Image (spheres, rainbow, N blue to C red):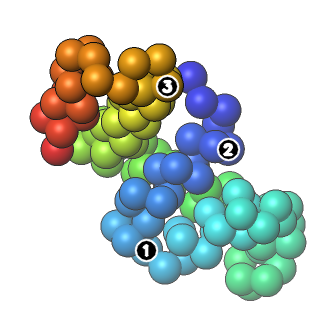
Amino acid sequence: MLEKTTRVNLLYDFYSPLLTKKQQQILEFYFHEDWSMGEIADHLGISRQAVFEGLKRAQGALEEWEEALRLLQRHLKRREIADRIISEMQNSPQSERVKSMVQELLDLD
């Protein structure tokens, strides 16, 4: 499984438009800018507890959307297949296995 920060950042890339502006800010400050909850609270004029709850709710929302839509899962699968294709092409670019993997990748979309 992906490290928590990496997973949240990837989920954020897919689903951030679905979050409120405040949730976006909190996640960006915490995960992208590496601010503490206290720094975020001071900057936004809210309590540290509100930041904690905002982080918790936003991460929960991201996970719920991923469970329903599976955009990250599909992205990672496409990446895995693409890596296999690249590896296979280095060995024998004309093989039927390469054609099959390319078709598998295309079928995901």
Q: Residue at x 47, y 50 (%)?
A: 11
The residue that label 1 is drawn on is 20
Rendered location of residue 90, percent (x, y): 49, 25
**SS at mark 2 in the image:** helix
The residue that label 3 is drawn on is 90
Mark in the foreground, 1 or 2? 2
Q: Compared to 81, does 39 lie above or below?
A: below
Q: Residue at x 45, y 31 (%)?
A: 86
Q: CA distance from mark 3 to mark 1?
A: 45 Å
The residue that label 2 is drawn on is 5
Q: Are the residues tagged 3 and 2 within 8 Å (C-beta)?
A: no
Q: Residue at x 58, y 52 (%)?
A: 9
Q: Compared to 42, does 96 lie above or below?
A: above
Rendered location of residue 61, percent (x, y): 40, 51
Q: CA distance from mark 1 to mark 2?
A: 20 Å
**SS at mark 1 in the image:** loop
